[in-house]
Image (cartoon, grey):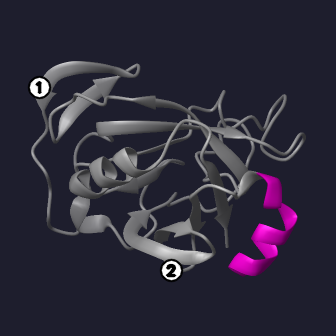
Amino acid sequence: MPIVEIEADWCNELSQPWILVTVATQTLSLITHGQIHQTYSISTSAFGLGCQQDSHKTPTGAHRIKRKIGHAAALGEIFEGRMPLGRCAPIVSLPVQAKQDLILTRIMWLEGLEIGINSGEGVDSYARYIYIHGTQEEGLLGQAASHGCVRMSNTAVVELFDLVNEGTFVYIGH
């Protein structure tokens, strides 16, 4: 969906910077005043798009950042249950899967805004723990490789985390 159409549909949400996740290009763009401010390489789900609970797919549609977690975490710090563990993971820069699917550095926890699509029983992005977060598998960025979340490089997720607020609108599209 073009930026203009998203802004027309969600104009009340878009007076502030917002995030556009484009699955086809595996990119995340920060949009400010209708212009792309920054674009990052990402990984969405290796299982495709979908909103069903336990599908391991990346949900589509309108979301917002409900919670930002990890503002003081070290680059590469591992989170478990949204709590920093106090240790960092080695970053894999080759395009190979690591042994574990770790959540690193920063977490932006997404809440769906569309009842019955990505919000509510059986499809709720927040209840599914869908995040934008750092990954140890930086070599896989640019291709679908996650288990539902939106993965970013650790330096990029710190930059984005500092540029957005809780409540920032996020649109995940094809």
Q: CA distance from mark 2 to mark 1?
A: 32 Å
Residue situated in front as seen by the camera: 139 or 168: 168
Q: Is residue 113 above or below residue 154?
A: above
* Residue 102 visible here: no
Looking at the image, residue 113 sits to the left or right of residue 125; the answer is right
Three-letter amino acid code of the residue under disc 1: Arg
Q: Which mark is residue 69?
A: none
Label 1: state its secondary structure. strand
Residue 167 % position (x, y): 62, 39
Name the residue at 22% across, 66% down: 139
Q: Say if mark 2 contacts mark 1, CB within 8 Å.
A: no
Q: Secondary structure at mark 2?
A: loop
The location of residue 147, given as percent across then percent down, is 49, 48
Q: Given the image, on which type of amino acid does mark 2 rest?
A: Thr
The magenta segment is 1-12
Q: Is residue 168 above or below residue 34?
A: above
Give the residue at x 56% y 39%. 130
Front residue (pair 64, 149): 64
Q: Is 11 colored magenta in this rendering? A: yes
Taking the image as shown, residue 135 lies to the left or right of residue 161, namely left
The quarter of the image holding the N terminus is bottom right
Marking on residue 87: 1
Disc 2 designates what residue? 25
Q: Identify the residue at horizontal 78%, vertical 38% (top origin).
A: 123
Task: Report if residue 92 lies within the magenta region.
Answer: no
